[in-house]
Amino acid sequence: MIIGENIHKSFGDLEVLKGVDLHVQPQEVVVLVGVSGSGKSTLLRCFNFLEMINEGSITIDGKKVDPKKDNLTKIRAEVGMVFQHFNLFPHKTVLENVIEAPITVKKMNKEKAKKLGRELLEKVGLSDKADVYPSKLSGGQKQRVAIARSLAMEPKVMLFDEPTSALDPELVGEVLQVMKQLAEEGMTMVVVTHEMKFAKEVADRIIMIDQGTIIESADPQNFFGNPQHERTRQFIQLVE
Amino acid sequence: MPELLVTVYDVFIRTYPGFLEATLVTLQLTAVGVILGTLIGLVFALMKISGSKILQAIANIYITIIRGTPLIVQIMFLYFGIVEFYTMSNFWAGAIALGVHNGAYIAEIFRGAIQGVDPGQREASMSLGMNRKQTMQRIVFPQALRRSIPPLGNQFIITLKDSSLVYIIGVAEIFSLGNREAAQSYQPFESFLVVGVYYLVLVMIFTLLLRLYENRLDVDKT
């Protein structure tokens, strides 16, 4: 679904990604872990072309993307992204947030979009919040709306950039629950998170990124039970 | 002290019919200055964020010149400048000068408001597949407009007071009437006190209306 090959990304003199290869299969759930500054969020942002890679290639759904020639908006529409700080549109109601892109990008008619929006809000358990503004929601509710908003574009893959890091501890569960449900439905997902319990339960594969390279890639059992790399062992000790 | 109050009251009663007319002129000057200034401000703000070096340079030159010279000089310059080529009433020369002057400040207000919108908003919009134009129109501008209302209100109040400078080209607004009244009556202190009260009351009404409007906008939305 996503093939990243030899991805290099620098910010000025700082090389954040130093040749990353990552293949994400359809319906696979890949969890990216690593200490902060390791480059995991940057990698995720490259997959959505919010950051442009300096070297290497990214193939989405069988199509190699050329950022210079291809219509990036079209590609972004097929790759959903959920942000750490939700980034809901504060001037629009919950339902309007969800139906904004289907209407403006896909030119879906408003009634149909509203129906879709309501279905998605029901899916994330927020039917009763359709007409309120985001400022009235808790962090967990905001993030669930953000997920519904991404799903409204019917993406082929969903990227989650530390979706629970900005939440109070008691609100983390409701967001992870929605993500787990998505995974069970067969959504292809790449998740950057520090929630190791989620990684253990939901991930097909856990990937450890350290200083801009992948140093470990294994299923949860092997990742936690039999890590190959010293840095992975240290990391696991740190988070458990 | 009571004597002073009595003379001020006398001046007020004697002059209010003229002042009401002059107030209308002041309000008209302010309205044109604000509307024209907003339009000019919008255009130059867009030029500044356009990414085109030439447009940015033009906007920067305009803003630098306007902010770097006194309004009264701009009024005189425009008045005599325009009259050279085109016959125009004093009122319109003054009103246009106010608009051109305001445009520079309002451009900076809009630019600040647009750039002040959280970059995450743009990213979220782009990640949903919206293009740059859609992102600006549907996501960034509506939020920027809301943010710019308090500083715009402030600028409107400044315009109202600045309109007094147009007296220099003989527009019959509040200050110019007060000036004449002071000279004719030999009561400058009382006359200018009355002038001050007119501006103060207008500004207070303006402030109140703005606050009501801001409160209405804020309901439910961050």
Image: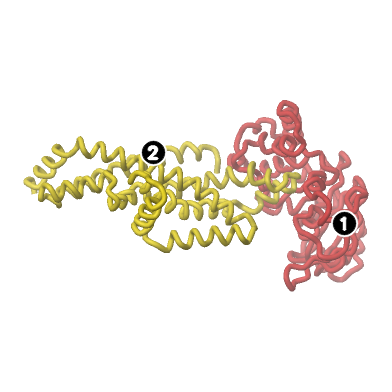
Chain colours: A red, B yellow
Residue B184 position in % (x across, y down): 12, 48
**In which chain is the residue bearing label 1?**
A
Amino acid type indicated by mark 1: Ile
Horizontally, is B25 left or right of A124 in the view? left
Amino acid type indicated by mark 2: Leu
Image mark for residue A58:
1
Residue B20 position in % (x across, y down): 25, 37
Residue A117 position in % (x across, y down): 73, 32
Seen from the viewer's position, the closer of residues A101 and A33 is: A101
Quarter-wise, where is residue A122 in the image? top right
Residue receiving disc 2: B209
Circle 1 packing at 10 Å, graded few (<14), some (14-19), many (20+), is many
Horizontally, is B80 left or right of A69 in the view? left
Point 34% across, 51% down: residue:
B162
Point 42% across, 53% down: residue:
B101
Seen from the viewer's position, the closer of residues A127 and B175 is: B175
Residue A129 position in % (x across, y down): 65, 33
What distance separates the C-alpha of mark 1 from that of mark 2? Answer: 55 Å
Mark 2 lies on a secondary structure that is helix
